[in-house]
Image: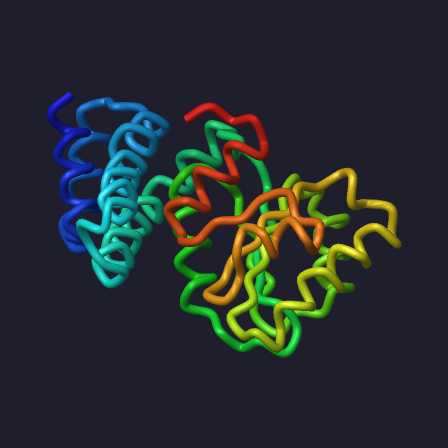
Amino acid sequence: MEELKRIAERVEKGKHLEVPEEVRKALEKGIPPYDILINGLQAGLAAIGERFKRDECFIPEVLLAARAMHAGIDLLRPLLAEAKTEPMAKIVLGTVKDDLHDIGKNMVGMMLEGSGFRVIDVGVNVPAEKFAETIEREGASLLAMSALLSTTMPYLKTTIDVLKEKGIRDKVKVLVGGAPVTEEYAMTVGADGFAPDAARAVDKAKELLNIRS
């Protein structure tokens, strides 16, 4: 559909001022909000995510696309709530204790939300107990943690150990990432998965939760 294609193209190009107008036009033509979300906004973000994975664009372009997508989601959110559109799954997201880095985390959060997940972002410098409490309170299916310093990497394991102590480790998948983190390290600390960047974090989250793209 031409309207949805235009929305996707504008999201991919990061045209955050144009996306809301295109969304309004699509709504006026009777296109369901969920179709606009999936085949317009999310399709545009997925397209730039694929380009990012192929090293055909850079982080600023992905952030602009995410901003454009969110401009459209802001218009759709009340309509989706009325239609009781459920997110694919709830994900708790945060950077571990003693680590104040948030750019990568924020990018992952935007990509996950843009792909249909409900993201509960608990911020940076997050103690293991806060991760655990949020998972229990929200009934989250996945915990996405990042550590951007070699000195904070061990806290990934500390958090996973706390989940075990509280008896909730088996109820949630754990996805980790961050500049110094490797897939081998992720497996060593007991995580279920590793993602080297935001685009692949979406793919891995879907894989861990058995969600088909």
Judged from this view, the residue extending furthest toward the front is 184
206 or 120, which is in the foreground? 206
The answer to whether residue 114 is above or below residue 189 is: above
Indicate the quadrant containing the N terminus: top left, top right, bottom left or bottom right: top left
The answer to whether residue 51 is above or below residue 146 is: above
User: Residue shown at 76%/38% (left/top)?
Assistant: 171
In which quarter of the view is residue 156 placed? bottom right
186 or 200, which is in the foreground? 186
113 or 175, which is in the foreground? 175
User: Residue shown at 54%/74% (left/top)?
Assistant: 149
Indicate the quadrant containing the C terminus: top left, top right, bottom left or bottom right: top left
The x and y percentages for residue 134 are 71, 55
Q: Is residue 143 left or right of residue 171?
A: left
Q: Is residue 69 left or right of residue 22?
A: right
The x and y percentages for residue 136 are 77, 48
Q: Is residue 174 left or right of residue 121?
A: right
The answer to whether residue 169 is above or below residue 153 is: above
In which quarter of the view is residue 158 placed? bottom right
Q: Is residue 89 left or right of residue 62?
A: right
The x and y percentages for residue 6 are 12, 35
